[in-house]
Amino acid sequence: MNGSMGQRLRIDLTNRTYEIEKLPESYYKKWIGGRGMNSEVVYHESFQGMDPFDPDNPLCFGSGPLVGSFAPLSGRTTISTRSPMTCSNMGTGIHGHGDTNMGGGWGPMMKYAGFDQIIVKGKSEKPVYVFVDDNKIEFKDASHLWGIGTKKATMKILEELGDHDIRVALIGPAGEKLVRFACVMNSFSASGGRTGMGAVMGSKNLKAIAVRGTNPVKIAHPQEFMKASWALREKIHNSPSAIRRRAEGSLDLFDVGNAIGINAHKNCSTGYMKDIETLYGGMQWANEFLFRRKACWSCPVGCGRYTYIKEGKYAGFNCGGPEMESLCNLGPRIDSEDIAGVTVMCGIVNELGMDSVSAGAALSWTMEAFEKGYITEKDTDGLRLEWGDVDTSIKVLDMIAKREGFGDLLAEGNIRVAEKLGVGMDIVPHCRGLEHISVDPRVALGFSLGYAMSTRGSDHLKNYSCLEFPGCAKSRAYQVDEVLKPATAKKFWDNFPSQMTQIDTKPELCNWSEKNKCIADAVGCCCQAIGSWGGAGTWKEAYAPLLKLATGFDYNDDEIFKTAERIINIERAHWLRDGSAIQDDTHIDRYFDEPVAGGPHKGLKLDREQWAWAQQEYYALKNWDNFGFITDDKALDLDIPEIIPDMEKGKKIFSDWVIKTTA
Ligand code: SF4
C-alpha cells in the first residue's frame, strides 16, 4: 500500500484485547483516510439513539495518506465519535456525529507504528493507557495518572516509557470527569478541542494512547512526490500570509476580525470590541509573552507558540499556545482586557483538558445570565461572575473540570445548563448544541450558513468560507473563478468588498469550501495552507497532485471531490437518522431579532426570509429534499445505499416531532 499503511488497529478495552484489520485498496479509494475513514466507522458502528457514553461507541483516531510524509503541514489527526456535547433542537438527549482535528505530531507516529487508524471500544475496569509500539500493544495501569493535568501526565508517561520521542494523545481531569466539552491533547498544546472527544475517552477510562513507530510511509512515485512537496513547501513558506503567521501566530487574525466587525465580544453579542487591536494584536502579544515558536509535524509555517510570562501577577507562568480561538473566546468573549490573565486561562484550559471555545462560552453565558438577572448567586453556590472577571473565571474553569459546585452544571455545556435552570436559552449562541466560535453569524454570512450546515454543530472548520472576507477574495481572484459559477463569481466582484454581508453567493461558496476543507482533513494536512490566506492555493492545486503521487491512485479531481461529498453526506446521515434535519440548520432567534450592537456592521441582523432561501438553495445544490434529508438518488450516486433505510427512519422521527410540536 502506498501513502497509507494498509491496516488499522481495533482495541477492546473491556477485554484488553486488540485486533489488526487489513484494509483493501478500494476502501482507501472510497474514503481516502483521516476524517473519511473515521466518519465511515462512526456512522456504521454506532446506531440511532445510541448514548455517546455507551462503551460500544467507537472512538476513532485517523490519519490520512499524506500524514508522516514530506508533504507540508502533514501532521494532522482526526478524532471522531458520536458526540456527547452536541444535540438537536428536538432535545438535548439526541446526539449526532462529532469530530475534531488536532495538529502536533501524534498522527505521523501512529502511522510509523503501522496504522492508519486506531478504533477504541469498550470500557476498562480501571484507568488505563495504551502503548502502541510498532506492532506491540500494551495495556498499562493509569491509576497514578488519574486527576493529573495533560502536561504533567505527558511527562510522566514519557519518563515511564523511557523515550521522549514517543507521542502521547491524552485527556486531563475534565475528560476523566466526563465534562461534555473535554478535549484530547498532544504535544503539550495541540488540542483536539471540539465536540467532547475527551469525554468519550474518559468514559472508557482511557487516559492516553502513546505511540512509537519505525515503519516508513511508502510513496508510489517518490521522486516526483519530493519535487512537488519541496515546491509546495517553498510556496507556503514564502507566502505573505505564512510570514505574518510565523511572526504573530494565528493571533494575526485578531485585528482583522475586529476591524470587519465579526468579533465574539460579550458572549457573541456585539460583534466589536473597542481598542482590541492594541490589546490583543499579534505583535504586541509576541513582544510581551512569546518564549519561542513551534511547528506541527512537517510544517514550514510554524504558527504554534510557547508562552512565558516574565513579570507581573502571573510571572513565571508558562504553557504551550495560545492560538487565536482560545484567546478570543477566553478574552473578548468575556469582555476582558487583561491579556496576561487571559493568556494564563488559555494555558489552564489546556492543562485541564477542555475545549477553549466551549469553556469561554460557559463563562460568557454565565456573565450575561447574571447581567440579565436570569440567575443569581442562589443558582451558583454564592459565586458571582461579572464581565471581565479573570480571577473568578480561573476558579470556575477549575470547578468545571473537577465538576465541583456550579462547575458541575456548566460542565454539561450551555444548552443543558439553560435547560436545567429553565432560563437563558435565548443567549446560547449555538447550532446543534455546539457553541459558536469567534465569528458573528449576523455579519459573515458564509460562515453563518456554514455554522448551521456543519456536520458537527456550529463550527467554521467544517466550512471555512474565508473567501467572503474583505481582501481574501481579491487576493485569490482565480479561486473565485474556479470555485463559483460565472454568474455567481460576477456577483462576488460586483459586490466586493462588502459581499461578506450578502447572502446570495453563500450557498454555492459554502458547498464548495466545505469540500475543500474535507479533503484537507481526509489527506491529513492542516487547513491553514489552503483557502484564501494560506498561500498553497485550493485543494486542487495543493493536495490533489500530492495525493495522486503518494497513493499512485489514478482518480481524477472530480472523483476526489466526490469522495469529499461522500464523507460530508455520511456525517449528515448520522444526524438525519436521529431525525435532526431542517429544524437544526439554523441559528437562535437572537441573531434574527437583535441587531449587532457596534462596529462597522452596527444594526445588522439575519433576515428570516433570506435565510429560508439560502437553506433551500444549499439543499438543492446538495440534492437533498426540502427538509434537508439526503435523497435516494444522491445516496446511490455516492455509493452509500445503506443509508436509505436510515433516512426513512429519520423522516419518521422528524415528522412525529413536527406533529407533536405543532399540535
Ligand atoms: S500552520 Fe500552524 S496549526 Fe497548521 S500545521 Fe503548521 S504549525 Fe500546525
Image: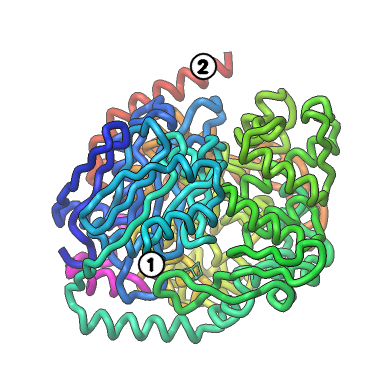
Q: Are marks 1 and 2 in contact (CB under 8 Å)?
A: no
Question: Measured from the top left, where is residue 157 in percent x and y?
Answer: 43, 54
Residue, x 41% and y 66% (percent of image)? Answer: 164
Q: Is residue 110 above or below residue 175?
A: below
Q: Tell whether 13 sits left or right of 374.
A: left
**Residue to which mark 1 is pinned:** 165
Q: Assess disc 2: are there few (<14), some (14-19) or many (≥20) residues with their C-alpha within 10 Å of its C-alpha.
A: few
Q: Tell whether 337 sits left or right of 153.
A: right
Write down the quadrant of residue 645 in the picture.
Answer: top left
Mark 1: amino acid: Asp
**Residue to which mark 2 is pinned:** 659
Q: Nearer the viewer, residue 38 or 621?
A: 38
Residue, x 52% and y 43% (percent of image)? Answer: 457
Q: Which residues are magenta?
A: 542-564
Question: Measured from the top left, where is residue 16 in percent x and y?
Answer: 27, 37
Q: Nearer the viewer, residue 415 or 178?
A: 178
Write down the quadrant of residue 45 in the picture.
Answer: top left
Question: Measured from the top left, where is residue 574 in percent x and y?
Answer: 38, 36
